[in-house]
Amino acid sequence: MSKNGNASPKILSIGWGKMEIEDLGKGKDFKLWPGGGRPWDWDEYGTGHSKGIQIDDVKELITQGAEVVILTRGVLSRLKVPHKTKSFLEEQNIEVIVTSTKQGVKLYNDYVSKNVPVAGLFHSTC
């Protein structure tokens, strides 16, 4: 369990451009953390396939008590993860996993089932 005592929501299904999350419903891309989550709006911090996942994208995951963060690069692994973003998480003593979305969903749900305080950013298309 996380510091706030809440488990991370399970990912119930994923397909091209669509995900279904326990207690959150359906959407395209999600930010998930111990106790909840929300749709992931790339425009919020200027995320893009070339610019990659921004440090501000991951800060919310840390404040929600994550000890493991899974950053998915998309189904075709086109979303970049800048070194500065990964380093920022590591400096906070957070275990970081960067992988394809399909593998990331599997790992994330495995951590959830083991009550590990896991968070992630999930991109359901390219």
Image (cartoon, rainbow, N blue to C red):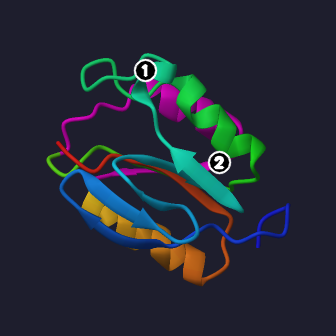
Q: Residue at x 85, y 61 (%)?
A: 4
Side of 20 relative to 64 (left or right): left
Q: Which of the marked residues, 1 or 2, is nearer the chain's N terminus?
A: 1
Magenta stretch in the rendered image: 77-100
Look at the numbered disc 1 and give the secondary structure of its residue: helix
Question: Can residue 33 be found in the magenta stretch?
Answer: no
Towards the viewer: 14 or 114: 14
Distance of mark 1 from mark 2, alpha carbons?
25 Å
Residue corresponding to mark 1: 43
On the image, the x and y values in percent for residue 1 come to: 76, 73
Identify residue type, mark 2: Ile
Residue corresponding to mark 2: 94
Q: Is residue 96 visible in this depiction of the protein? A: no
Question: Can residue 81 be found in the magenta stretch?
Answer: yes
The quarter of the rendered structure image containing the C terminus is top left
Look at the numbered disc 2 and give the secondary structure of its residue: loop
Q: Residue at x 39, y 23 (%)?
A: 47
